[in-house]
Image (tube, helix red, strand yellow):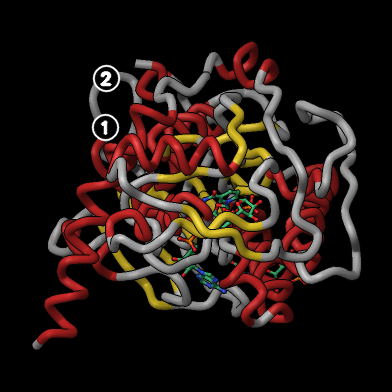
Amino acid sequence: THEFSVSNQNPIHGKMGRVPVGIGRRRMRIVVTGGAGFVGSHLVDKLIGRGDEVIVIDNFFTGRKENVVHLFGNPRFELIRHDVVEPILLEVDQIYHLACPASPVHYKYNPVKTIKTNVMGTLNMLGLAKRVGARFLLTSTSEVYGDPLQHPQKETYWGNVNPIGERSCYDEGKRTAETLTMDYHRGDGVEVRIARIFNTYGPRMCLDDGRVVSNFVAQAIRKQPMTVYGDGKQTRSFQYVSDLVDGLVALMEGEHIGPFNLGNPGEFTMLELAEVVKDTIDPSATIEYKPNTADDPHMRKPDISKAKELLNWEPKIPLREGLPLMVNDFRNRILNEDEGKGA
Ligand code: NAD
Ligand code: UDP
Ligand code: UDP
C-alpha cells in the first residue's frame, strides 16, 4: 500500500538499523504526543497495526490510560507520562505532535498552560526533531481561521482571529505553533507537515468535554435535553475520527508540507445535528436553548481540494454513518459511570 512503499529520506533509519516491516519499508519509531487522548489513541492504533514502534508522551490532562490500555504489554508500545512543556531526549524517526487540550472547556480551564503547551511544547518537539533528524507533524486547527470571513475556508485564507479573547490561548497558540514549525523548516531544514483539523468526533471522546457532538450524544443517552447554544443556526462540519487518522498518515508519509485542511465538508447547523442525534439515538429526545459562548465562529466548512489533489485523501464516512459508530462506546461508558455511582 501507499504507506509501505514510501521510503523516508531521513538518514536516521540507516543508523538505527530497523527491522524490515513488509516489503520495502523499515520499521520506524514514532512519537505521538497526546497519544492517550481521543485522536491520538486512534492514530496510535493505526501505527501499531501497521507494524511500527510507538512512544506515547502524555500528561493525562484530558487523555486517559483506558484509551491505550489494550496496547499495554505490546513490546512495540511505550507510554511516558510527561509534559511537553519540559524538554525530553528520545531517538525517533517521526513525531506526530498532538499534545494540547482541544475542547473549549479544557483549553480555557488554564489558558496560560494552553499557551505554554502550544508554544513551549511545540518548540521542544521541534528541537527534538532537529536534533535527531525526525519528520515532524503539527496538528493545527480550523480555529486558526477564527470567525472566518471566507466560506468555505481554503488554506490560503489568513483568518479572522481575536488576539485578546477567551479562545485566543488556543487559536493564537496554534497560529504560533504553525509559525514555529515553518521557522524550524526554513531555518534548520527540519522536515515538517501541518494539518489544520476541523471538528472531529468518534469513540473515546471525553464524555463531558463540552464539544457539541459529545454533549448531544451523552445528553440523548442520559435522556437529558440536548443543549443548543445561541440560536443553533451556526454551522460546523463533522469528520469521523478514522478519516482524520488516514489523512494525518497520508500527510506524514507524503511529499507536501501543507498546511492542509483535514475535515469533512458536509456542513450542518447545530439544530440539524440535534436532528441527526435524535434519529440515531432517541426519537423522543428534546432540545434546550442556552446562551452562546464568546467569539463563537458563525460558520465553518473546509475546502479540501488541496488535500484531495496532493494527498489523494478525502473523508469516507458521512455524519449519519459515523454517529452510530460512537454510540456504543458512549453507552458503555455512561453505564459504567452510573454503576460506579450506584455502588
Ligand atoms: P484530547 O484532549 O482528547 O487529546 C489531547 C491529548 O494531549 C490528551 O491526551 C492530553 O492529556 C494531552 N496533553 C495536553 N496537554 C499536554 C501537555 N502539556 N503535555 C503532554 N500531553 C498533553 O484532544 P483531541 O481531540 O484528541 O485533539 C488532539 C489534537 O488535535 C490537539 O492538538 C487538537 O488541538 C487537535 N485538533 C482536534 C480537533 C478535534 O475536533 N478533535 C480539531 C482541531 C484540532
Ligand atoms: N529539545 C528537547 N529535546 C531534544 C532537543 C531539544 O526537548 O532532543 C528542546 C530544548 O530543550 C529546547 C527546544 O527543544 O528548549 C528547542 O531546541 P533547539 O535546539 O532548537 O534550541 P535551543 O536549545 O538552542 O534553544
Ligand atoms: N454547541 C452547542 N451545544 C453544546 C456544545 C456546543 O450548541 O452543548 C455549539 C457551540 O456553540 C459551537 C458549536 O456547537 O457553535 C461547536 O462547538 P464545539 O465546542 O464542539 O467546537 P468548536 O466551537 O471548537 O468548533
Give residue 332's quadrant in the image.
Answer: bottom left
Give residue 1's quadrant in the image.
Answer: top left
For the residues labelled 1 and 2, the Cα–Cα distance comes to: 7 Å
Q: Quadrant where the C terminus lies?
A: bottom left
Q: Give coordinates of residue 38: x percent, y percent.
A: 40, 55
- Residue type highlighted by circle 2: Ile
Q: Residue at x 23, y 52 (%)?
A: 329
In the rendered structure, are the residues bearing label 1 and label 2 in contact, judged by CB atoms less than 8 Å apart?
yes
Q: Residue at x 17, y 63 (%)?
A: 72
Q: Residue at x 28, y 43 (%)?
A: 281
Q: Secondary structure at mark 1?
A: loop
Q: Secondary structure at mark 2?
A: loop
Q: Is residue 7 above or below residue 10?
A: above
**Nearest to the observer: residue 160 or residue 193:** 160
User: What crowding class fits label 1: few (fewer than 14 Cα within 10 Å), some (14-19), or many (20 or more)?
Assistant: few
Q: Is residue 331 above or below residue 197?
A: below
Q: Quadrant of ligand 3?
A: bottom right
Q: Which residue position holds label 2?
A: 23
Q: Which residue position holds label 1?
A: 20
Query: Left of 288 or right of it: where is 130?
Result: right
- Residue type highlighted by circle 1: Pro
